[in-house]
Image: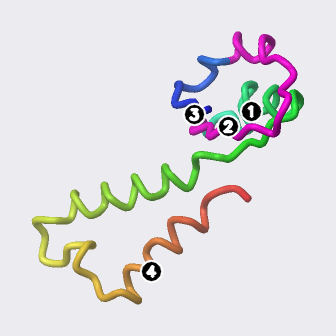
Amino acid sequence: MVSTLPPRAADGLAAQVPRLRRRLPLLDVAYDPWPSALADAWERAGGHVVSGLTMLLHQAVEQVHRFTAGTARPAAELPSAEHEQMVARMRSVLPD
């Protein structure tokens, strides 16, 4: 299951999550609040929740590439080590 709904949009559905027969995964891209009501309900029902924060991080990296494309120092053209440092700095602000 993949949920790309805006914050709190699935709160009403959370109470309707049935008991799962298998440990099915849910990729929930909600980040505020985290965990979402849907993610909590999914885990209580026996499912496995995967945060979408990594996906959102990589979307942000791509946005930096696009925003800096016409500059003197495009992020997409940084040396590999510098690019990795940029991504690591962005990742460091994500919650554990």
The disc at residue 84 is 4
Residue drawn 68% across the image and 34% down it: 33
The x, y position of residue 17, in whole percent, is 78, 18
Question: Residue at label 2?
Answer: 26
Q: In this view, does 8 lie above or below 51?
A: above
Q: Distance between the residues labelled 4 and 3?
A: 28 Å
Snapshot quadrant of residue 23: top right
In terms of secondary structure, where does tag 3 sit?
strand
Crowd band around label 1 with a 10 angstrom C-alpha radius: few (<14), some (14–19), many (20+): many
Is residue 16 within the magenta segment?
A: yes
Which residue, given by chain and number where applicable, does mark 3 sit on?
2
Highlighted range, magenta: 11-30
Q: Are marks 3 and 2 in contact (CB under 8 Å)?
A: yes
**How far apart in space, not on screen, are marks 2 and 1 (Cα)?**
7 Å
Disc 4 to disc 2, C-alpha distance: 28 Å
Dot 1 falls on a residue whose secondary structure is helix
Discs 4/2, front:
2
